[in-house]
């Protein structure tokens, strides 16, 4: 592995040099273990501790198949799916790996007693499999997490609709929280040159998801002037949704839970901010009963911030706790777009407010190939910036996932894999200098 790292750090390593580097037999990877999938049985979600279930193991380098690439991972990031994996909720990810393993002799490789997790990476291509022509050893890349087979016509217009659609590093093995990752070559995209490895790895999954959910015609199709209610506006998804709203001429109404998080939203350029803790919204009276009076109080507050207007688009992901309020505060003809249910997936809302006011609920999930490419392009052009607040080592991934699970983090949390330190891998200092304040916005809290 040292030889690989030396080659990456040296300024003059050629593609042929990279291709000639011997691959190690094993690499260090963050895993969960199949024989521990029941370890948290009987505990509440909050009590389940990722530090206990995430391991750093030496695992064999997987065999490279057609259309695939092995990538030396310089940095990765923690996504909420790493939290779900580590607490084995809502199901153990080994069920995904077993199912994938049944598809073909090639996918059988994924069905192992350990799961290498992680759905983001920035790094360097080491090897490409047969049929890969666009990428070469030595290319500096990021990878999006859409894994598809595309053998069915269902996914030919929108690759997210492929019946064999999976999230790499969550529903497949050999993910990015490791020194080496296995990806399909169509997941690869150029690494934004003005960013360090850990900054380039941070936006991937959440940036692409927010792009489809909010901007793309497959999601809410946001337009200039729209009032966009963004839950968790300084969190992983929300910090990109807020930037998309601002960059697209919309008006974000940012919901956060502390003055510190409100300050970050202000630093991004948002003006309308609701601190849900300070204003103490209680949308549920008890576990089974919502309180429409609280929806109304929330709607009134939104009107105060918008000069009397209601919400065109709700960027939803908290789920059960907020969904009733989200449907209520949306304007006639408006859209609630949802990609998650962090607080519970059995949503409850008053359907009269939906049908009588001709509102739409749109389900959204990650992003198709093209949307992921567009989202990365905006990062590379310096129109949207990483929201990295803190970086951990591979050994500390359990702690990083714990912080995200407990909502102790801001924006995105990075993980250094092979990169020996932060700030390395920048190839375009001039562009970086233009955007340095925005790049560091989440660091300075
Ligand atoms: N379908 C997909 O493709 C996809 C992609 C990415 C993420 N997701 C899912 O989306 C969810 C959020 O992901 P993320 O990366 O943005 O996580 P995150 O970084 O933890 O941010 C989520 C934010 O939502 C807010 N929040 C959490 N619980 C809430 C509640 N009960 N009521 C109101 N606000 C609440 C919190 O902000 P405040 O405390 O400041 O309000 C939190 O910071 C996760 O469930 C994740 O699995 C889905």
Image (cartoon, helix red, strand yellow):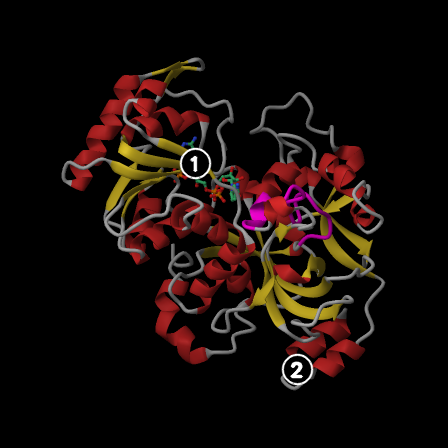
Query: Callout 2: helix, strand or loop?
Result: loop
**Is the shortest distance between ligand 1 and the CB of mark 1 under 8 Å?**
no
**For mark 2, does the 10 Å Cα neighbourhood hold few (<14), some (14 to 19), or many (20 or more) residues?**
few
Residue extending furthest bottom?
12
- CA separation in Å, label 1 and label 2: 48 Å
Magenta-drawn segment:
157-175
Q: Residue furthest left?
A: 307
Query: How far across and down, in percent of the image, does residue 119 sit?
Result: 61, 51
Residue 127, horizontal then vertical, whole percent = 75, 69
Single out the residue that lies furthest toward the front: 153
> Which residue is denoted by mark 2 in the rendering?
10
Circle 1 is placed at which residue position?
A: 362
Does residue 236 appear to the left or right of 111 in the view shown? left
Question: Which part of the image, by quadrant, shows the C terminus?
Answer: bottom left
Query: For numbered disc 1, what is the local secondary structure?
Result: strand
Quarter of the image where one finds residue 41:
top right
Q: Is residue 372 visible?
A: yes
Q: Position of residue 320 (x, y in %)?
A: 45, 25
Instruction: Answer with mark 1 or mark 2, whichever residue precedes in sequence.
Output: 2
- The residue nearer to you, when weighing 190 against 268, is 190
| Contact? badges 1 and 2 (CB < 8 Å) | no
Q: Position of residue 217 (x, y in %)?
A: 41, 48
Q: Main secondary structure of the magenta part?
A: loop
Above/below status of 181 relative to 113: below
Residue drawn at point x = 27 percent, y = 50 percent = 250
Q: Dot 1 surroundings within 10 Å: few (below 14), some, or many (20 or more)?
A: some
Res 33 visible: no
């Amino acid at each position: 592995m040292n030889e690989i790292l030396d080659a990456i750090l040296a300024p003059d390593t050629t593609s042929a040099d990279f291709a000639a580097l011997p691959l190690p037999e094993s690499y260090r990877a963050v895993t969960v273990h199949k024989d521990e999938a029941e370890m948290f049985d009987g505990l509440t979600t909050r009590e389940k501790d990722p530090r206990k279930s995430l391991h750093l193991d030496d695992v064999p380098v997987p065999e490279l198949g057609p259309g695939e690439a092995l990538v030396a991972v310089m940095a990765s990031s923690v996504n909420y799916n790493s939290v779900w994996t580590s607490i084995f909720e809502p199901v153990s990810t080994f069920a995904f790996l077993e199912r994938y393993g049944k598809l073909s002799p090639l996918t059988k490789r994924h069905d192992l007693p350990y799961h290498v997790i992680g759905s983001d990476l920035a790094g360097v291509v080491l090897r490409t499999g047969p049929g890969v022509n666009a990428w070469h050893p030595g290319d500096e890349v990021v990878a999006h997490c859409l894994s598809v087979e595309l053998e069915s016509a269902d996914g030919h217009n929108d690759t997210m609709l492929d019946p064999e659609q999976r999230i790499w590093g969550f529903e497949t093995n050999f993910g990015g929280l490791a020194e080496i990752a296995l990806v399909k070559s169509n997941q690869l995209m150029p690494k934004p040159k003005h960013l360090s490895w850990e900054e380039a790895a941070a936006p991937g999954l959440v940036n692409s998801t927010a792009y489809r959910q909010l901007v793309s015609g497959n999601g809410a199709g946001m337009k200039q002037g729209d009032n966009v209610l963004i839950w968790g506006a300084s969190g992983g998804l929300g910090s990109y949704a807020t930037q998309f709203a601002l960059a697209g001429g919309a008006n974000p109404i940012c919901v956060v839970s502390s003055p510190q998080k409100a300050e970050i939203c202000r630093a991004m350029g948002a003006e309308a901010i609701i601190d849900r803790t300070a204003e103490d919204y209680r949308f549920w009276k008890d576990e089974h009963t919502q309180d429409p009076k609280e929806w109304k109080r929330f709607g009134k507050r939104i009107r105060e911030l918008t000069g009397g207007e209601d919400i065109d688009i709700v960027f939803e992901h908290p789920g059960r706790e907020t969904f009733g309020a989200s449907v209520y505060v949306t304007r006639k003809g408006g859209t609630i777009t949802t990609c998650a249910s962090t607080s519970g997936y059995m949503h409850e809302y008053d359907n009269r407010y939906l049908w009588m006011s001709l509102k739409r609920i749109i389900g959204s999930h990650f992003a198709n190939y093209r949307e992921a490419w567009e989202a990365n392009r905006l990062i590379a052009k310096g129109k949207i910036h990483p929201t990295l607040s803190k970086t951990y080592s591979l050994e500390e991934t359990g702690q990083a996932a714990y912080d995200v699970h407990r909502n102790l983090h801001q924006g995105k949390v990075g993980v250094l894999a092979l990169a020996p330190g932060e700030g390395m891998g920048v190839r375009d200092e001039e562009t970086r200098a233009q955007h340095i304040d925005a790049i560091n916005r989440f660091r300075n809290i």
